[in-house]
Image (cartoon, helix red, strand yellow):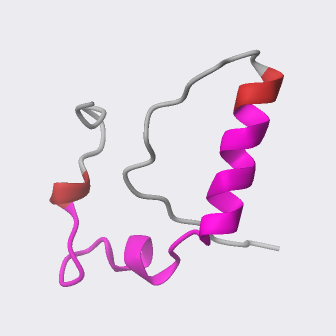
Amino acid sequence: MPALAMFSPTECDASSACDDWYRYKAPAALVAEIERQLLEIHGMHHLPDVVDASFRDWG
């Protein structure tokens, strides 16, 4: 499945202005839980594969 037009993982790399994207990688368990919740809440049976995920706790 192609990446969304608004963001492509190839636009960022570790040496670019996207450093935070790579510094705050979302833990696999968090991504799995989000996928589980999306499937349940929306009554879905399939989600596209996660290409990349980042997470930042602002709290």
Most extreme residue toward the top is 43
Most extreme residue toward the front is 45
Residue 6's place in the image compared with 52, above or below, is above
Image spot of residue 18 (x, y percent): 31, 71
9 left or right of 49?
Answer: left
The count of marks equals: 0
* Membership of 40 in magenta stretch: no
5 left or right of 24?
Answer: left
Identified at 26% across, 74% down, the residue is 17
Instruction: Say which quadrant the C terminus sits in.
Output: bottom right
Identified at 29% across, 44% down, the residue is 7
Task: Report the front residue among 26 and 48.
Answer: 48
Q: Which residues are magenta?
A: 12-38
Instruction: Say which quadrant the N terminus sits in.
Output: top left
Identified at 63% across, 56% down, the residue is 31
Identified at 71% across, 32% down, the residue is 38
Residue 5's place in the image compared with 55, above or below, is above
The quadrant in which residue 11 appears is bottom left
The quadrant in which residue 27 appears is bottom right
Residue 42's place in the image compared with 55, above or below, is above
The quadrant in which residue 57 appears is bottom right
Residue 49's place in the image compared with 41, above or below, is below
* Membership of 24 in magenta stretch: yes
Image spot of residue 22 (x, y percent): 39, 77
Image spot of residue 26 (x, y percent): 57, 68
